[in-house]
Image (cartoon, helix red, strand yellow):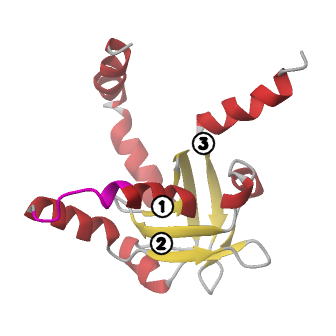
Amino acid sequence: MGFFPLFLPIIYAMAGLVGEFEVRLDVKGRFLFPSGLRKQLPSGSQRDFMLNKGFEDCLTLYPLPEWEKISEKLGKINLFNPKNRMFYRLFHQGAKQVSLDNAGRLLVPVAHMDRVGLHAEVMLIAYNDRIEIWDKQKYFSMIEGNMADFAQLANEVMGEAHGNE
């Protein structure tokens, strides 16, 4: 029983970020970073982030240490290959470092809001090492549009993972 408190943070850290959080943008494009999400971040990763365009119609927010891990991997790709260069450019398009202010709010730059059509109602979707920032209506439309294929997707994704055990 004495080892359990020492073991718990290791399990928790390995689980990654998780959850859906509804927030509202104020007139300046700021939202209050949810405390439940902030508590999931390691203490040194709770203030500074890298924001860029996501793969779908959303923004992606990376805690700075996670962005640095990705950047290290990207630094090893062969930039003499045209596909690699294009991926590098597309991945980094509009990347900007952002930080929580003293009130715990995060400012989303207007250019980023315009790029993905963010309005006042926003969803933060936390998974693994990142947080997606979606316009609420677009997020739920995307989810609803993919629910019919969820069973097949689960089989394709998790069937492969299960087969590798």
Foreground label between 1 and 3: 1
In the rendered image, residue 111, in percent from the top left (x then y), is placed at: 42, 84
* Residue drawn at the location 29% of the way across and 24% of the way down: 152
Within-10-Å neighbours for mark 3: few <14, some 14–19, many 20+: some
- Main structural element of the magenta stretch: helix, strand or loop? loop
Label disc, if present, on residue 160 of the rendered structure: none
Query: In which quadrant is the C terminus drawn?
Result: top left
**Which residue in the protein does label 3 denote?**
18
Q: Which residue lies furthest to the right in this view?
A: 2
| Res. 47 visible in picture | yes
Q: Mark 2 belongs to which amino acid?
A: Leu
Q: Give the range drawn in magenta.
A: 73-80
Quarter of the rendering containing residue 149: top left
Q: Could you tell me which secondary element the residue under label 2 belongs to?
A: loop
Mark 2 vs mark 3, CA separation in Å: 21 Å
Given the image, on which type of amino acid does mark 1 rest? Answer: Glu
Give amino acid for label 3: Val
Q: Of the residues under marks 1 and 3, which one precedes in the sequence?
A: 3
Nearer mark to the viewer, of 2 and 3:
3
- Residue 6 location, x and y as percent? 81, 29
Residue drawn at point x = 52 percent, y = 48 percent = 129
Dot 2 or dot 3: first in sequence order is 3
Up the image or down, 147 lies above or below 39; here it is: above
Disc assigned to residue 68: 1
Residue beneath label 2, please? 118
Left or right, 37 with reference to 95: right
Across and down, in percent, residue 134 comes to 48, 61
